[in-house]
Image (tube, grey):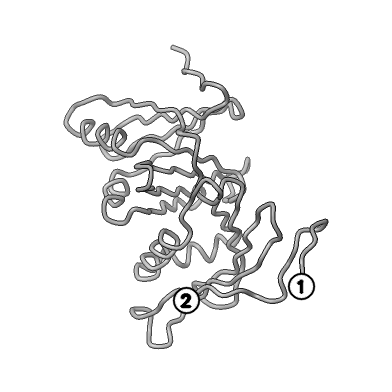
Amino acid sequence: MMEQEPLNGRILFKATAAKRYIDFQLVSCARKDYRHVYIPRTYIVQMRRDDMVIVDMIRTLVFLIKTEEINALNISIHWPDKDGQPITDSYESVYIPYDEFMDFYWASREGGPTVWRSLDMDYIRQPKFVFEDKAKLHQCLKNKIVRKKLIRYLRDHFSGGIDDSNRELHFCRHPKPYSFTIKAVNPFPTVVREMVLRDDRGLSTARYWVSQVTPEIFIPGTSAET
């Protein structure tokens, strides 16, 4: 049977349940290879507590973000390149109804339906997270204390909205451990900030802080005061 085509250019999300994982597939007119990503069930359960989960599979990076304002689940998948190397600028993102997906998830554990589909809700977007320094991201995620602090900070301070649909947050190299330089790219001038984990008394009490870096960097062709 042929795969259902998305309507009017929207993305079709397909979930296929197995015993230990859920197979995610994003189908769109722009991409015809329909790649799969297998999310362990433990990460989906973790969303009930953390609202935001980062699934780091070395070559593929997945963000699962519960957006309470519209009761939706944002799934953003960052794919590897053609040689299997990890990259972050090739990604797809979709919003699906959170409650309906979780109903499917729990039912699939009890012998219920094993396949569920939903069209992208397509009217709200998180800012796009682009981790250019993937090695630093791995460093953060491997440390349980830092991983929890990073995920909570991203969730609480970089929430999405309709006005963020064209905005990208690039997390770039920073000299300090567990820290990033942030470039917020949108139609307005690009401002550079840094997100630094301050741990003067140890990681257990460390906190992330964001401050603006000077001088600012502006997109060529725009006019703004320096």
* Image quadrant assignment for residue 23: top left
> What's under tag 1, amino acid-wise?
Thr
Residue at image coords 49%, 72%: 178
Residue at image coords 21%, 31%: 107
Q: Measured along the vertical axis of the image, is residue 73 above or below residue 152? A: above
The quadrant of the rendering that contains the C terminus is: bottom right
In this picture, residue 217 sits left or right of residue 112: right
Residue pointed to by mark 2: 197
Say few, some or many: other residues with alpha carbon within 10 Å of mark 1 (under 14 / 14 to 19 / 20 or more): few
Q: Nearer the viewer, residue 50 or 56?
A: 50
Furthest residue toward right? 221
Residue at image coords 48%, 44%: 76
Which circle, 1 or 2, is nearer the viewer? Answer: 1
Label tally: 2
Q: Measured along the vertical axis of the image, is residue 95 above or below residue 188? A: above
Residue pointed to by mark 1: 226
Residue at image coords 60%, 69%: 181
Question: Picture coordinates of residue 14 (x, y %)?
Answer: 41, 29
Q: Nearer the viewer, residue 35 or 102?
A: 102
Tell whether label 2 touches label 1 (CB within 8 Å).
no
In this picture, residue 42 sits left or right of residue 65: left
> What's under tag 2, amino acid-wise?
Leu
